[in-house]
Image: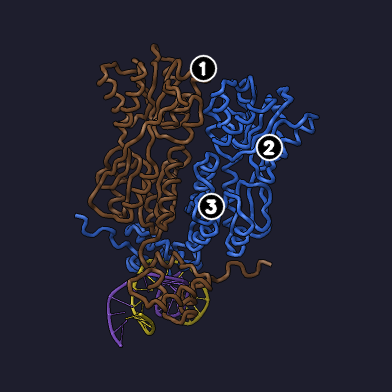
Chain colours: A brown, B blue, C purple, D yellow
Amino acid sequence: MHADRRPRSVTRADVARYAGVSTAVVSYVLNDGPKAVAPLTRERVLDAVRVLGYRPNAAARALSMGSADMFGLLVHDNRSPFFAELCHALDQASADNGRSLLIVNSDREQVATSEQIRDLVSRQIGGLIIADVLTAREQSLVEALGIPAVVIGQFGETDGLHSVGVDFAVGARGATEHLISHGYRDIGFAGSAARYDERERGWRDALSAAGLPLGPLVHVPFTHQGGYDAAMQLMRAPRRPRAVLAASDQIAIGMLAAFGQHGLRVPDDIAIASFDGTVAAEFVWPRLTTAVQPLEQMAHATVRILLASGDDRRHHEFATELRVRESCGCTVA
Amino acid sequence: MHADRRPRSVTRADVARYAGVSTAVVSYVLNDGPKAVAPLTRERVLDAVRVLGYRPNAAARALSMGSADMFGLLVHDNRSPFFAELCHALDQASADNGRSLLIVNSDREQVATSEQIRDLVSRQIGGLIIADVLTAREQSLVEALGIPAVVIGQFGETDGLHSVGVDFAVGARGATEHLISHGYRDIGFAGSAARYDERERGWRDALSAAGLPLGPLVHVPFTHQGGYDAAMQLMRAPRRPRAVLAASDQIAIGMLAAFGQHGLRVPDDIAIASFDGTVAAEFVWPRLTTAVQPLEQMAHATVRILLASGDDRRHHEFATELRVRESCGCTVA
DNA sequence: CTGAAAGCGCTTACAG
DNA sequence: CTGAAAGCGCTTACAG
C-alpha cells in the first residue's frame, strides 16, 4: 500500500537532462542570472520545469548561498492579540517576497532566548525579526552574529539594530487629549512597569499641558489578567479616576471584564481609551476607543529593511491613528 | 565599522581539526551514532565544540538527510484566538523535540493553498501540520507528496491522513445539557455553515434527548463579526431563544458585544455557552461557560505522530471539559 | 573504534 | 550564450 512513500523528487539535473542543457543554465533561468540565457533555451527550460513539476530544493539552495529564504521571528508570546496580528502581517509581507517565517516564542522557561537566537541562525535564516524586548547581552549577541535584524513594535531606537515602531508618546498623548476633551479631569494610566514606557510619558505630557493633576498610575503585565488586576486596584483606590488610558487593548479588555463584574459602567462611571487597535477592541461593549498601530505598513517596512540590509537608517517610526468608539464616552453611529 | 559582518562561521571541519579527529567522528558524537565513539575521543570532540562555539549548519544537514528539523504549519488565520493558542502549543511541543515551526497562513487571496503546501515541502519540512480544512484536491496532493501530515482541530477522521481533534459532538452535547439543566427550554445554536458540524449535531442530540424543540439555528463565519451578526439575527427573529450555544468562543464574544450594544443582559435575558476554552473567554463579562479543548495534549500528540510517522492509527480524539462560568447563568465564586 | 570519500542539490566563478 | 567543475557543510556506507 504505502510501499514507496516520499517519491524521490525531481532535481535540477532531471530538468537539465529533459531540456537538453547543463544544470548551470537551469539555474540561470530560474534565478534570472547571473548569466543571460537565449530566449529559446529559456523556453525549453521553463517547459521542462513545468512538465516535470520541478521545485528547487530549498535546503540545497540555502547551503549553497549561505542563507535560506526564511526570516526568523522571535516573539514573546504569539497568542497575545496584538502580536498575533503582527505575526500575521509579517507572514503576509514575507510571503509577498518569497520568504517564509520561522516563528519562535521566547516565553519558555528552561530555554534561554540567546539559545533560540543561535538556533535560528544555525538554520540559516536570512534575517531576524524581534518582536520582543532583548537584554543587552542578547542584543550584542545579535550584533555579533552579523545577521540583518530589526526590532519591531518596541520603544524608540534600539541602538545598533534597525527598528520599526510607532510613536508611542504622541499616540498616547493624543488618546489622553481625547479623554480630556470629554471633560474628564481625573485620568489614570494602566501600563507596564517597564522602566521607560513612552505611552506613560505621553499621558503625563497631555495632562500637564492641560494643567491637570496626574491621575492614579498602576503598573501591570501586558495581559488580560494584568488589565483585570489594574481595574481592581483602581476600584480599591481611595479616589477612583473618571477615566483611564490603558497601554494596550488587552489591558483595556481585562479592565472592562473587572468593571463589568463589579457593576461599574463604562464609560458612564469610568471611561477608557487604549492602544493598539486590535480586532478584539471592536468586539467588546462598549467598543474601545484606541490608538491604532499601522501593522501592515510596519510589517512591510520590516521586510524591506531585511531585504535591503543597508546600514544607513535606524529607527523607522509610524504614527498611530486614534479610532474613536464608545468606551471614551463618544456616541458612534 | 561594519567591515566584516557575518563572520564565516565555524564548521564541522574546524571542530575536527581542533579535536584531532576526522569529521565523521564529529558527526558520530553529535548525532549519537550511527557509530560508537570512544569516551575519551568523545570528550575531546565535545570540548572542541564548546571552545569553538560550534553549531551545525541546519541547511547542510537538511540537504544531506533529505529532511529539515522543521515542521510546516498551515493555518487559516493565526490571529483567531483559538488558532493563536494552537500555534503556541505546537511551537512549544515542536521545540521540545528540537524542531522549529514554519507557519503559513492560508487566508491569502492570489495564492493557492496547494502552492503553499508545495512550497513548504520544497523547504524540506519533516512533517506538515494542517490546522485548516483542505479541499479534496489539496488533501490528495498532501498524500501524493508522501510527507507525514496530521490534520488538527477539525472534524472527525480525515481519511488518508492522521488527525488529532476533540470530540465535538460530545462536547457540544454536554454544553447544551448544561444549558438545559438551567431550565432553559428554547436553546439556539450559532455556528458555521459547514455541511457537517458535529457541534451542531451535539446540540440537536441534547435537545431531542430532552424532548425539547430545536431552537433557532444561525450560520455565520467563525469570527467576531460572525458572532455579532448571529446575535443580530437572533434578536430580530420572531421568537428570541432563551439561550444559545456558540460554536466558538470568538462567536460568543461577538454575540456578547451585540447583545451589550442592544441592551440585552447575559445571562438574564439570554444565556450563552460556547466552545474552545480560549483565554479571552475568561476576560469578558459575564465570563464564558465553555467546552475547553486540551490544546497542550493535542499539540504533543500531533508532534508525536509526526516523529513516529507510523501508519497504524488514524484519528486521535480527545475529550473537552466543560468550564462553568457566569454566561450560562451559574454563579461562580 | 576511526577515517577517507562519495553524495545530497544547489550556485557561480571560470573557460570557451 | 553555454558548460564542466568546484564548493557549500553535512551524513553515512564502506574499509580498515
* Circle 1 residue: A262
Q: Quadrant of the C terminus of chain B?
A: top right
- Which of label 3 and label 2 is nearer to you? 3
* Residue A296 sits above or below residue B147 on the image: above
Q: What amino acid type should be assigned to the residue bearing mark 3?
A: Leu
For badge 1, the amino acid type reads: His
In the drawing, does residue B290 fall left or right of residue A131?
Answer: right
Q: Is residue B28 among the parts visible in the rendering?
A: no
Marks 2 and 1 on same chain: no
Between residues A265 and B316, which one lies in front from this camera angle?
A265
Q: Is residue B84 above or below residue A6?
A: above
Quadrant location of the N terminus of chain B? bottom left
Q: Position of residue B124 (x, y in %)?
A: 49, 62
| A42 displayed left or right of B216 | left
Say whether mark 2 and mark 3 are on the same chain.
yes
Residue A94 in sight in this render: yes
Q: Which mark is residue B74?
A: 3
Q: What residue is shown at x 58% (from left), y 67% (from top)?
A: A6
Q: Say which residue label 2 marks.
A: B171
Earlier residue among tags 3 and 2: 3
For this orientation, the residue located farthest to the left is: B1
Q: CA distance from mark 3 to mark 1?
A: 41 Å
Disc 1: which chain? A
Which chain letter goes with mark 3? B
Alpha carbons under labels 2 and 1: distance apart: 31 Å
Does B62 sit above or below residue A289? below
Residue found at the far top of this picture: A238
Q: Residue sitting at 66 percent across and 47 percent down?
A: B155
- Give the letter of the chain under mark 2: B
Residue beneath the point at 27% across and 19% down: A210
Residue B102, percent across and down?
48, 53
Whether tag 3 and tag 2 are in contact, CB under 8 A, the answer is no
